[in-house]
Image: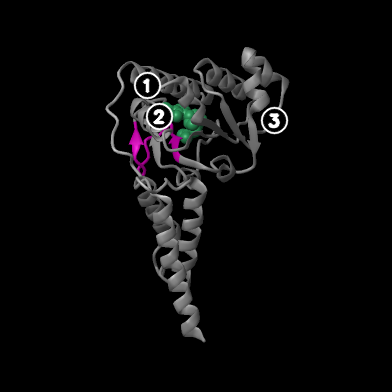
Amino acid sequence: MSDEILQQLRIVMVYPAHPGNIGAAARAVKNMGLSKLVLVSPNRFPSFEAYQRAASADDVLDRASVVETLQQALRGCIYVAGTSARSRTLDWQVNSPDVCAQKCLGATTEGEVAIVFGRERSGLTNKELEQCNSLVHIPTDTAYSSLNVAAAIQIMTYELRRTMLKNRAMPVVKSEPKYRDDLPASADQLDGLYQHLYATLTELRFFGSHHPEKLMRRIKSLFNRAATTQREVAIFRGICSAIQGRRTAAKK
Ligand code: SAH
């Protein structure tokens, strides 16, 4: 494995409020050999303060993409890890930083990968976490578990670099290709599937007394864990279309 694989990784900051954190994140990204920083609706960017904190990583800031939504930031990604200062009780798989780094690097053989960092004050919302395949929590003192966001980025990018170097020194036995004649589904393809499923289940009045959001979260959690492929997405969308077609025909 070469440093090349670190270029397949995106560091995504959701609604960063403080330009200094963006600058410090850019520096961490460059120090650890990554290059892609994506900013979702930053409060202030570009800014002098960000460039000041970035020091010689100004090129990372120059090339940073600025988008409006997390969905846009994740376009084309086939594996997404979300970071959390808390260990949540919901259905997400929570990994340690080293396991997360190994999973992310493993996924780079199939496509682009993102690690998502939340707002300084409130972290990531449940809706945003639903777009992640897994969560990572950096073990901190439970009495004060919340790291500064740029410090969390520094730790995770270090972990990615450390794991990349370890893998290079001791290559893991190459396993069977995961997808044979198929490709992993991207975050936006999965999103399309969720919308289609939601529309179909609504038409069927399936939600009834169930809380639609909670049920959809369960369904998303299943597809996120399953490393769903493009063909599998097409199959499920085909099923949805068939159900919708039947209902339309029955109404005529
Ligand atoms: N009060 C917020 C904390 C936000 S800290 C909350 O409880 O969620 C801002 C961001 O830094 C988090 O969204 C996450 O991306 C990162 N972060 C902070 N501490 C972390 C930890 N211990 N493990 C992983 N990420 C962490």
First-in-chain label (1 vs 3): 3
Q: Residue furthest front?
A: 181
Marks 1 and 3, how far apart at CA: 33 Å
Residue located at (44% from left, 72% from top): 242
157 inside magenta stretch: no
94 inside magenta stretch: yes
Q: Which residues are magenta?
A: 79-95
Give the crowd class for mark 3: few <14, some 14-19, many >=20 residues within 10 Å: some
Q: What residue does disc 3 label?
A: 44
Q: Which quarter of the picture shows residue 103?
A: top left
Quarter holding the N terminus is top left
Q: CB of mark 1 within 8 Å of CB of mark 2? A: yes
* Disc 2 element: helix
Comparing 223 with 172, the one in front is 172
Q: Which mark is residue 105?
A: 2
* Disc 1 element: helix
Marks 2 and 3, how far apart at CA: 31 Å
Q: What residue does disc 1 label?
A: 163
How far from the left and from the top, in percent, is residue 233?
Answer: 43, 56
Q: CB of mark 2 within 8 Å of CB of mark 3? A: no
Residue located at (37% from left, 21% from top): 163
Residue located at (50% from left, 84% from top): 251
Residue located at (44% from left, 78% from top): 246
**Badge 2 amino acid:** Leu
Mark 1 near ligand 1 (CB under 8 Å)? no
